[in-house]
Amino acid sequence: MPGSESLSCRHSPSLLVLGAALAHAAWNVLAHGTSRLGLPFLWCGALVSTLLWVGVVPLTGGFTPADAGGFLLGIAVSAVLHVAYMLVLQSGYRVGNLSTVYATARGTGPLLAVVAAIALLGERPSTVALVGVVAVVAGVVAIGLVDRRGAGRTGSQSIPGATPALGRSRSPRRLDPGILFGLLTGVAIAAYTIWDAHAVRAWDISPVAFMVGCTALEVPLFSVLLLARRRHRDVVAVARATWRQLVAFGILSPLSYILVLTAITIAPVALVALMRELSVVLVSLFGAFVLREGSPVARVAASAVVAGGIVLLAM
């Protein structure tokens, strides 16, 4: 949307993005805890998400986009991008600390999304908003680097048949693998954020219908990967052991992005992408005080910088 939007329009998506940040932080904590389970959990998560939300579609506009071809193209590309996102995110959580991976990803993704929104969508953030961008990016990068010399992480589940966790010993002279996977996750975030914003705007697609279509297409994509890696036999065991987590994931993961897609239809992509970074604060605090990932003071200080940047973005 044009950068000349009114102040009221800038404030209208705030509650949507706040709700999205809370839901996003919650499901990422779940994803971190089940990261050893690999593809079986992701396959189950996509299936459960589709089944839980498909009944909401008729209540939120239905599958009636102005351009059916555009709808199919939109969800097809989005499904591929989201599968790539989930794979690199889960890989990162297997080898890195929760807050390191999450903060690095959330810092990289919005930065790239802002650049792309300016270059491709013609958005022009205000000077104050650009200062907020700098603060948010600086804060999330600081959070991601706080635990660079950490020795490990906690909180993953151990399920029979699941892929063993990768080695956790790290040399301080090498790049933390959590940061590397966080950067890759950030690239995926930027890609799907820009594409999905284009799709729901250009083809007038209901956010709920778009998300359900996307998760439905993720199921066959994950099925191919399951068969190729011979992990399909683990699906039943994982589903039985983690059905509570799967229900929570199936509700929260789509909800977080449905709220974001709705906000994107009434506010600039750059603004929405950066305001979502409140979730970095929540995840960082969870990692510091619940998972005891270390350096809580530094994490809280960096989170405060993120919060300050969010305030500037909302002004």
Image (cartoon, grey):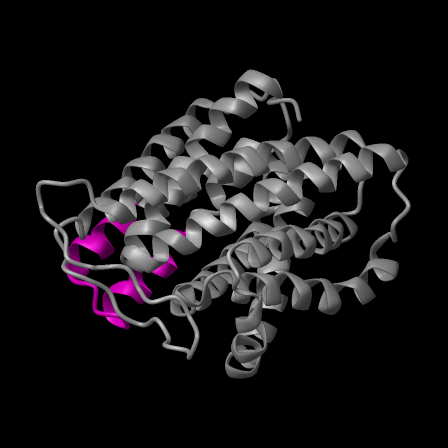
Residue pictured at 50% horizontal, 31% vertical:
113
Quadrant of the snapshot with the N terminus: top right
User: Is residue 238 depicted above or below 165 in this figure?
Assistant: below
* Magenta stretch contains residue 30: no
Q: Nearer the viewer, residue 144 or 219?
A: 219
Residue pictured at 10% horizontal, 48% vertical:
171
Q: Quadrant of residue 248?
A: bottom right
Kindly tell me whether residue 312 is visible in this rendering.
no
Residue pictured at 55% horizontal, 40% vertical:
272
SS assignment for the magenta stretch, majority: helix
Q: Nearer the viewer, residue 64 or 311?
A: 64
Residue 255: x and y in percent read: 63, 59
* Magenta stretch contains residue 286: yes
Residue pictured at 88% horizontal, 33% vertical:
67
Give the magenta range: 278-305
Kindly tell me whether residue 73 is visible in this rendering.
yes
Q: Quadrant of residue 96?
A: bottom left
